[in-house]
Every structure is written in C-alpha cells, then in structure tokens.
Amino acid sequence: MAVNRLGLVVHRARPTAVAAAHTAGAWAAAHGISCVELDVWRGDRPRRSAHEESAAAGHPDLLVTFGGDGTFLRGARLAAGNGAAALGVNVGRVGFLTEITADQVEDALNAVHEGRHTVEERMMLTLRASRPLEMPEGMDALLRYGRGPALPPPRVRPGSSPEEVGWGVPLDAIAVNDVVFEKLARDRQAGLAVYVSGQLLASYSADAIIVATPTGSTAYSFAAGGPVVSPYLDAVVFTPVAPHIAFDRTVVAAVDEAVAVRVLPTSGRVAVSLDGQLRGVLEPGDWVAAYRAPDRLRLVRLAPTRFYHRLRDRFRLADSPAADPAPPFYRPRSPIPADLAHLRLPPAPGDPPEPGPGGRG
C-alpha cells in the first residue's frame, strides 16, 4: 500500500519510543508524506473519540504505534474504526501484538510503502446496552492518578436513536482484546447473569466477567485461566474471574452468538472496560451485550506470522524436564500433498524469519 498520510501513537514516557517516532517522522518528511501524532494526552483537554481523533489528523491510512501492547491497543482503537492499517513498534516488555522493534522502523516503513507486506485481519467486539454508558462523578479524578486523561464513555452509534430499548442502544465502541465487567467496590461482589445467544447460562457472584476476542484470549482472559484461542479463528470467549460457583469454566461461543451480561438487583456497581480502559459504570438492572463488530482490525505484517512460536517465545514456555528436545518446526522439504494444501503450514526452509525481540534475524 502506498502510504499517503502517516499517523503516530507514542508512549511519551519511554525515550526509546519517542526516538523511534522521530525516525518515522523523518522518514515521512523525506518522502513528502504528511505525518501527525494522534491521541496526545494533554491535561487541559479531554481525550476524543476515535472518529474525532482520526478526522483531526486527516484520516491517516497507516497508523504506527510506539510502545508496548497497551500503546498498540490505543492505536488500534483509532485505526479500526477508520479503516486504517496498524503497525506496532515494540519498546515494551511483552509486545505480543506488536510487529517490529525500534531499530527496524525505517526499513518497515519502506516495505509497507513499496507493498512488501501483507495485511492480517482480526475480529473485534462491539456493544449494545440497555442505556448509554455513563461515568459517575469523581471517577475521572481517580483514573487520572499517575496517567493521562480517561477516554469518555462511548457515544450512541451514529444513525441510531438513544431511545431504542428492546434490542438495546448500539454504542460507538470497539474492543480488540476484551470487554470486562468488574466489581467497582472491593467489598461488594458483582452479581451478573450471563446470557449466550439470548439464553441464560448462569448467574455469577464474581470479581469480574471477561468477554474476549481470540486476539484477547492471551491477555486478561489467559491470566484468569482462560484458553489460548488461535487469532485466525472468529469466536467469542467468555471467562469468569473468581466466581463463587462450581462452574468456573471458560465458554467459547460461536462468532454469531452474542454474550450479554445483566447486573442483578443485589449487585454492587459494575465497571465496564474496553481493552483495559474504563468506559462506564453499570447499575443493578443494566445490561450490555458484546458481539462481533462489523469492522475488522487490519494489522500490517512484514513476514509470515508464527503465532505459536510467538506464544512460546513471549510467554517463555518451558518444556517438561522429562521430555526429549524437539525441533522448533516440522516441515518436510517435499511438495505439499493435495489434501494438505488448504492448511496453514509452517514456513518452508529459507522463508524469512518472523521479527523477534532482537531484530529480524
């Protein structure tokens, strides 16, 4: 894809991220390409919606993030709702979602500009709710402690009426990783009824309920004991956190099955977070449904994605002491048989390796 307008999202507390962003800005200037920084946190103004940020930046067609996975999710929020592609530069500790390291920025931008890349699509979640989400007075001051201003509650989706009741109010919000329903007060459990495809699964007294995408299955859901789900699969992953119930298992629902969460009458207030950002608070009687968004996140890839290799590497998975050493890949050199040609297979010998923490080598 020819890059016509470049957008940057920078973790400004990290000097390496700032320096790498300067490299991207210099590359854009050398190629006569407009470059603008988005989602800049300023204490004198609130953060804006994804559509407002993108419009103010002139709708970049490529958005590059400089930070860790949290910064990447900030950029993905802006890219996904506006059809831009996203490229993550890792200067964090894990970098599960990011693609390249800081020393690869210039080469990566050249590759994208010259079309030497692929675009990988990931499913996201969107929401309908019994009413528009709101933030109680005083919450913003708590959220600002030690970090930038909070995102505003999501607006009603354009073209929709806030008076819609039966099927809920459609919210202008997307989640790349997860939607989390979490107890707001430490001394009050969240009482939550979970419906899958309109049918009651169970009522939970729990710390939280996580509704995740396959991409988000390796984030909070994984930490809470949920499964690793291939990002090439479209599904909705539901995981309870510390539930007071014998049935504490994750449910992997079909992609066309919505997961709805209703706050029960005796519950305390429930916070709703999207990709780790608090976006509203629910009262008893409120409900929110999470389901596949119509738009998909477009990720720039410079080499074939090796998800399970990345999973092993980033989480430092250790082999059983009783097991014999095993090769990192199994891929015969002979031609692929016809009945295997439709499968996602490991790279052939000689294919370029996936970028790692130390570079592309």
Image: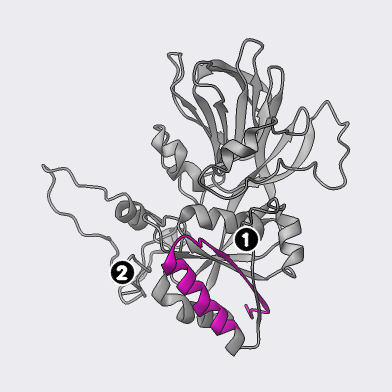
Q: Is label 2 or label 1 in front?
A: 1
**What is the span of residues highlighted in magenta in the rendered image?**
1-28
Label drawn at residue 96: none
Residue 285 spot, x, y in % from top left? 71, 17
Q: Amino acid at mark 1?
A: Val
Residue 84 spot, x, y in % from top left? 66, 65
Asked whether, in this view, residue 163 is left or right of residue 242, the answer is right
Residue 16 spot, x, y in % from top left? 42, 68
Secondary structure of the residue carrying numbered label 2: loop
What residue did someone put label 2 on? 358
What residue did someone put label 1 on? 40
Residue 114 seen from this side: no
Asked whether, in this view, residue 11 is left or right of residue 356, the answer is right
Secondary structure of the residue carrying numbered label 1: loop
Q: Is residue 46 magenta?
A: no
Disc nearer the start of the sequence (2/1): 1
